[in-house]
Image (tube, rainbow, N blue to C red):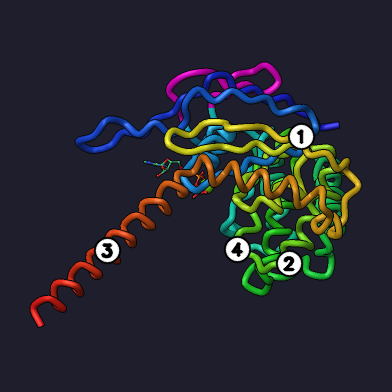
Amino acid sequence: MNQSNVRFDAVCKSYPRRDETPLLVLDHVSLDVRPGELLVLVGASGCGKSTLLRILAGLETFDGGTVQVDGRSITGPGADRAMVFQHYSLYPWLTVKENIRFSRQLRVVRDNLTSSDVEIASGRSDALLQLMGLTHAAGYYPNQLSGGMQQRVAIARALMNRPKLLLMDEPFGALDAQTREVMHDLIRHVHQLEGTTIVFVTHDVEEALYLGDRVVVMAPRPGRIDSVVDVPFGRARDQDLKSTPGFLDIKRRVLHRIRETSGMKTDIEQLQQLSRHIQAGNAAAALSQGDSA
Ligand SMILES: Nc1ncnc2c1ncn2[C@@H]1O[C@H](COP(=O)(O)OP(=O)(O)OP(=O)(O)O)[C@@H](O)[C@H]1O
Ligand SMILES: [Mg+2]
């Protein structure tokens, strides 16, 4: 089975800023991803979720600490890690099936593979088409597909080479609520079937708790890990779970942590203070107008 063990140890990352001290985006982030688990990162906008995922994908450098997959330090992107982004990223000139097989065909050319390798690849792409419910659309081009179908193709393409790690950055962020529900059940099914370790980023707490074995709550300024929630619902889940008292209770607690750490509460308090100040100022002005009348 394709499993992986990821270890972030005291990872720090800053971005330079013009005329200012560098922006510290990740501050000594330490985190393990267990083999075969579906780990979800949640947190307020700007807390460094995508940065952490991109570092794991090898798409971003970091300034301190270590990141290892199966005991090996990451030095750049690799075929052992596949990424699915929020924005559809299919090749528009290739059909659904060609999109799914594209990376495998590159390998056939690069690694001089035999015709039996090609046949195996063809079997794999057919199996993935079926798994994703896309068999009927194998010959379509991306512009003939709905958003949900495009993301299913992107997931199938990512799974084609049996990556050890599937990295997903808000993959369903642009989909409508009903399609998202379908995608949630699909990704849970794929996870159980393929056994791939998945790191999934979202700011939707309900999505995080429905999908995750564990949910990591991150906090911003600087980006850090606030808390880790062991999701206590086992792996046999259905949509009704979302309206159970146990689910709603954890959801409330996670949302509370995000609000507490995001700084938004402070912003709201400042706004309330400001509006009280303005109201007091208006009242004083009205009084002084009354005096002069
Ligand atoms: N290339 C960059 N140059 C400078 N600053 C950046 C760059 N990329 C990200 N940042 C900053 O780093 C911080 C973390 O960004 P990141 O995209 O990781 O957050 P996020 O948690 O994924 O947010 P969101 O939920 O909005 O996607 C933000 O303050 C962002 O402005
Ligand atoms: Mg992001």
Residue located beneath label 3 in the image: 280
Q: Is residue 111 magenta?
A: no
Tell me, for residue 174, which label it has, or none.
4
Q: Quadrant of residue 68?
A: top right
The stretch of residues the image draws in magenta is 61-75
Disc 1 is placed on an element classified as: strand
Quadrant where the C terminus sits is bottom left
Q: Amino acid at mark 3?
A: Ala
Q: What x and y, as percent, mark residue 89?
A: 58, 57
Identify the residue shown where x is 54% and y is 25%: 29
Callout in the foreground (4, 3): 3
The Cα–Cα distance between marks 2 and 4, rounded to whole angstroms, is 10 Å
Q: What x and y, as percent, mark residue 226?
A: 58, 32
Residue located beneath label 2 in the image: 179
* Badge 4 vs badge 3, beta-carbon distance below 8 Å: no
Labels 4 and 3: the sequence-earlier one: 4
* Ligand 1 lies under 8 Å from the Cβ of mark 2: no
Q: Is residue 71 magenta?
A: yes
The Cα–Cα distance between marks 3 and 2, rounded to whole angstroms, is 49 Å
The 10 Å Cα crowd at callout 1, few under 14, some 14 to 19, many 20 or more, is few
Disc 2 is placed on an element classified as: helix
